[in-house]
DNA sequence: TGTACATCAGTGAACGCGCGTTCACTGATGTAC
DNA sequence: TGTACATCAGTGAACGCGCGTTCACTGATGTAC
């Protein structure tokens, strides 16, 4: 435990991190400003030095999440992959890994009910994640016979939807809707089939 | 407004329907037992004649939702479709339509945070919806060259995940993540590509 | 058909609780001279 | 290097609120005789 006096030092970020832990543990409804303050070792009123209120704190958590997601997406398409399938699978896997490793961020982003248009910054950074995904998929699309290519935006939307659906139904819900397949396997094979439908990688996978 | 005296007549179902409206309007966090009672024209305490508490009311709403979804899925594969694609698309479309027409149920089922294993009845009826989806997809799978068939459970999971992802990201979020494509178009073309990847319907779509 | 009675759905008052938010304040920090 | 002072992060007490839940009750319903 770092010593602290009257001034916390970095309360703002400490609150965000406490919020993330709470959201992860109790869901978006279980999160309260007061408890976040308590766990950060601070009076509830202190929170108002840094955030407009409860929802702004969640929004900040979501915003940091979109930033991480954007970076993760950018990273996923940085390394040249041996095949289109490998490239796409890397992007999908990155999404799964993100949800797994940053559940608090993930919930704040997609399950907390805060609107992506709540603040211009949030909208901006969400768009950046979106754009990163678009770029990642565009790179793959170039390796596919031109005749079969869907519009890039649609291609990205399909990948995102499939990844998101797998996370929501088969990863985050726990074994509730469980199949005998792991989320990773489910997603990777789904992407493989989809990609074959586009005419890419005839002999692959 | 139906007249009522001291006894409501059908308070239980009236509460469920009020709950659905509230959940739809304010999200799962905005729903309160007290307000549901108020809108049903009844004291909060009256709710406890019919439900164990707030969460049981939500669970009942979810349960009725799974029932509707199961029926919708069963209906979607009842009519013989001219092609495998048409069959699959009908199932996907049914899912979208369900989310659109029964947003309260949908939220209670997938966004309220109540566990599917909360009660045995809820688990049973959720499984029934799941099974209906499995059957709907199995029928399609039979029309596909055997060599390419994925395990039926995986096939169903892919369809579900794609549909669910499209709903969550591009239908329910409103225009937040909007693409230029409608959710229906997105889903239908996604299913088309996926199905071609399975070797079905070579010249179709 | 009429009366007595058991049942139980809904009442209304009350509770303790923790929430989000406000306010005037206090005391640590760091800058100017 | 030392002192005065402005800044502003965090305090702590207080608030009103609506929540979920409990309890002893009341009065409508429907059944038995």
Image: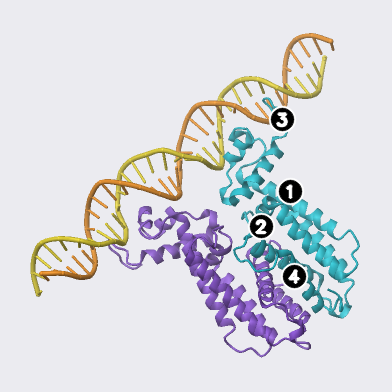
Chain colours: A cyan, B purple, C yellow, D orange
First in residue order: circle 2 vs circle 4: 2
The chain identifier of the residue carrying mark 3 reads A
First in residue order: circle 4 vs circle 1: 1
Image coordinates of residue B147 in percent, x first then y, are 76, 84
Mark 2 and mark 4: Cα distance apart in space? 17 Å
Labels 3 and 2 within one chain = yes
The secondary element bearing badge 3 is classed as loop
First in residue order: circle 4 vs circle 3: 3
Query: Do the residues under discs 1 and 2 have CB atoms within 8 angstroms?
Result: no
Residue A110 circle label: 2
Residue picked out by circle 1: A64
The secondary element bearing badge 2 is classed as helix
Q: Which one is closest to the eye, mark 4 or mark 3? A: 3
Mark 4 and mark 3: Cα distance apart in space? 46 Å
Q: Which one is closest to the eye, mark 3 or mark 2? A: 3
Picture layout, residue A126 above or below residue A92: above
The chain identifier of the residue carrying mark 1 reads A
Labels 2 and 4 within one chain = yes
Image coordinates of residue C8 in percent, x first then y, are 29, 61
The chain identifier of the residue carrying mark 4 reads A
Query: Do the residues under discs 4 and 3 have CB atoms within 8 angstroms?
Result: no
């Amino acid at each position: 435990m770092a010593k602290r006096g009257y001034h916390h030092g970095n309360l703002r970020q400490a609150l965000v991190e406490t919020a993330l832990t709470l959201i992860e543990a109790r869901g978006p409804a279980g999160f309260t400003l007061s408890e976040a303050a308590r766990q950060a070792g601070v009076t509830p009123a202190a929170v108002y030095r840094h955030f407009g209120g409860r929802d702004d704190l969640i929004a900040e958590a979501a915003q940091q999440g979109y930033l991480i997601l954007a970076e993760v997406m950018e990273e996923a398409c940085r390394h040249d992959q041996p095949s289109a399938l490998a490239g796409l699978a890397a992007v999908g896997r990155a999404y799964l890994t993100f949800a797994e490793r940053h559940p608090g961020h993930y919930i704040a982003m997609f399950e907390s009910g805060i609107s992506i248009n709540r603040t211009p910054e949030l909208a901006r950074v969400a768009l950046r994640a979106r754009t990163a995904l678009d770029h990642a998929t565009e790179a793959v699309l170039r390796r596919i016979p031109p005749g079969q290519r869907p519009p890039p935006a649609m291609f990205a939307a399909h990948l995102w939807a499939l990844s998101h659906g797998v996370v929501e139904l088969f990863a985050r819900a726990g074994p509730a809707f469980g199949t005998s397949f792991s989320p990773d396997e489910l997603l990777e094979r789904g992407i493989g089939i989809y990609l074959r439908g586009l005419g890419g990688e005839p002999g692959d996978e």
